[in-house]
Image (cartoon, helix red, strand yellow):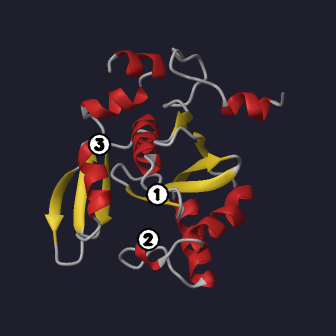
Amino acid sequence: MSAKRACDNWDNAECEGAVGCPPRCPRFFDDRGAPLLIREFCDDDGDDLVEMYASLGVESRTMGIPPADGDALRRWLTGIVSDGWSLLATRDGRVVGHAAVTPEGDSEPDFVVFVRRGFQGRGIGTELVKQVLAYAEDRDHERLLLDVSPENERAITVYQNVGFETVERTGMSRTMELPLAAPVVEECQRPPADRYSSH
């Protein structure tokens, strides 16, 4: 059995964490029981990330992002990954979700989350948001901000369920924020055994 196969079948419900663990356990199961891995973006991921975004339909684009044009998409991705930090959700090595936080050095950065068509509605976006919260606090950010289209009810519900609150509304967008001193951030950083035992 390969190490990759063993990792895919690993049940982390009893994991209590260890020295060197990331801020949140990188392994999780989506709402259909499929194992996924969350990891940090590396330079070799560029083409896979472009391919994921190119697969999105018009219904997944909001407020002009991600750009639909291939060259504009590459420029946008280059900007957000070079100015900030990113996490990827992968299934069998395939990128199925992306969260980007930018600018990296800002105490109150913005972030975006997108999930590949065919993988939406499975809890992957929610897990990416929780991962972002855990990593952002670990990187000394003070709060996270995001802009979301008022019509994107699914995303708004995800953000509200995690703890984001609306701080500004305009006709085209809703600005939401979450201070990283909020209790939900500590909950996101707890080892899986602690999180599972409290439910």
Tag 1's secondary structure?
A: loop
Residue 52 circle label? none
Q: Residue extending furthest front? A: 32
Tell me whether circle 2 and circle 1 mark residues in contact (CB < 8 Å): yes
User: Which of these two is toward me, 53 or 138?
Assistant: 53
Question: What amino acid is found at the position of numbered circle 1 in the picture?
Answer: Gln
Tell me whether circle 1 and circle 3 mark residues in contact (CB < 8 Å): no
The relative height of residue 146 versus residue 161 in the rendered view (above or below) is below
- Which of labels 2 and 1 is toward the front? 1
Q: Which residue is mark 1?
A: 120
Q: Identify the residue at image location x=48%, y=73%.
A: 66
Tag 2's secondary structure?
A: helix
Residue 127: where, in percent of width, then height?
Answer: 44, 42
Indicate which disc, 1 or 3, sits on the residue closer to the N terminus: 1
Indicate which disc, 2 or 1, sits on the residue closer to the N terminus: 2
Q: Residue extending furthest right? A: 1
Q: Which residue is mark 3?
A: 162
Dot 3, crowdedness within 10 Å: few (<14), some or many (≥20)? some
Dot 1, crowdedness within 10 Å: few (<14), some or many (≥20)? some
Q: Which residue is mark 2?
A: 60
User: Which of these two is toward me, 90 or 41?
Assistant: 90
- Which of labels 3 and 2 is toward the front? 2
